[in-house]
Amino acid sequence: MNDTPELQPYVDAYEKLSPQRLKEPDWFRVMRDEAMRSFLDKGFPKRGDEAWRYTDLSAVTGARFIVEPMTSRFVSGGVRFLKPSLKANFLFFINGQFQPHISGIPAGVRVIPLPEAGNDEGFRRAITRLFTDEMDSLQSLNFGLGMDGVFIDVPDGAAPDCPFYVIHWSDAHGALCQPKILLAAGTDARVALVEDFRGAEGKMYFSNTFTGATLAKGAAVQYYKIQSESRASCHTAAMKALQEEGSDLLSVSLAIGGKIARHTLSVKFGGAGAAARVLGLSLGADRQVLDHVTGIDHASPGCKSDQLFKSILAGAARGVFTGKVLVRRGAQKTDAHQSSKNLLLSETAKADARPQLEILADDVKCAHGAAVGQLEEDPVFYLRSRGIGEKEARRILAAGFANEVTDAIPLESLRELAGVRTDEKLGEMEAEA
């Protein structure tokens, strides 16, 4: 075990949770123990690790976070402030803790709080599959120490008429928030899941979350993430999808908040003819570090993946994209594309793009590309000649650059919400351009 002092608080916290863990089934407790041992062996990622060379977690490793549930004024004072104006099945997490009494659960779909899910066979199948592959240390920490979350079980052929909208609100200084969202989409099921991360400005907390989705044959899942955490916070999140034959995934990630924010997405095609479209947008200012990491595993033939990640950066912000596509032997007729495009609004902003391909089959179509640049002056001049100020002209052009990602959201109300959040952020970035 790595016995560095920075890990001792997590050892202490795990020991304090013994009474809760003893209430869980043996199989679940064993998995937790293995995950916690893995985290303690590896420790927190360091800048010396190739996968973390651009993202410094020293603000996390040097802090002592509180694992126990922490109160919030929103639990007793109402949550209308947090709910956007759209039709959805809202699920609330406050400081990492699920709030079933203020959440809405539709008929025909099972939503089981994690502490009650251990004896459910569907949950066991889903979580066992999702955690079969090796986890990185932060995913291990979430699995070992994160005690709260929900299991959403969508039966074969079901198609809820509105999305599941998960609101994560954090306002406790020093809190460690580690919820899990597990979604099982049955054969030919259709479901949309939104995760909206927000926090009280000025509060320093650590969100380390996990979202997993299993897609049965012919299932279609839309997954959207809007990350608007406090600018003093640290946010690390993993989303993992396992796709069976003919299933379809659309994933859109919008990164706006956080001092340091990293979103890791992994997709594995476990059946022929599956498809995944994956998009991301980072909007960074000041000294924010916004990091997107993807891994697409073409383990079956005839599957298609299409990735597009964009960043708009002002001040001394840094945007990072690392995307790997693995085409395994036997995965013939693979069609895989990835693209990273980055727009710098200041001389001190930085963008790093690392698209990667590993191809072990011979009958494939694969391509990748990356570009970093600034706004072209001719369009700026054109808008200024029409009476538009320079800053507004640059904001309009930046918004047009971002729209390629936000316009990919088919749900109109959610697309409008993403557009509003994007415009608000771009307005804040004008001063640093």
Image (cartoon, rainbow, N blue to C red):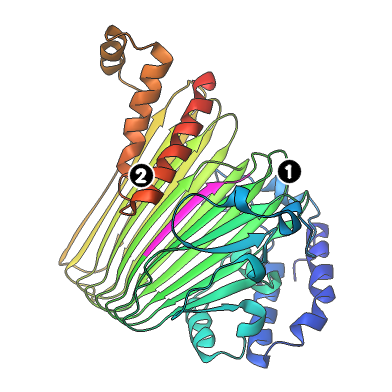
Q: Which mark is residue 203?
A: 1
Give the residue type at disc 2: Thr
Question: Looking at the figure, which quarter contains the N terminus?
Answer: bottom right
303 horizontally vs 21: left or right:
left
Above or below, 66 against 198 in this view is below
The secondary element bearing badge 2 is classed as helix
Q: Which mark is residue 327?
A: none
Query: Residue 371: x, y in percent?
Result: 32, 35
The secondary element bearing badge 1 is classed as loop
Q: Nearer the viewer, residue 282 or 95?
A: 95
205 horizontally vs 333: left or right:
right
Q: Dominant secondary structure of the magenta stretch?
A: strand
The CA distance from mark 2 to mark 1 is: 28 Å
Question: Which contiguous range is marked in magenta?
Answer: 222-229
Residue at the (68%, 73%) spot, across then down? 144
Give the residue type at disc 1: Lys
Residue at the (64%, 62%) spot, across then down? 93
54 horizontally vs 218: left or right:
right
The mark nearer the N terminus, 2 or 1, is 1
Figure quadrant of residue 70: bottom right
Q: Nearer the viewer, residue 186 or 60?
A: 186
Question: Is residue 265 within the magenta segment?
Answer: no
Query: Residue 396: x, y in percent?
Result: 36, 24
Residue at the (37%, 31%) spot, across then down? 399
Query: Residue 99: x, y in percent?
Result: 66, 67
Query: Residue 38: x, y in percent?
Result: 66, 72
Q: How many marks?
A: 2
Q: For mark 2, what is the residue?
A: 406
26 horizontally vs 186: left or right:
right
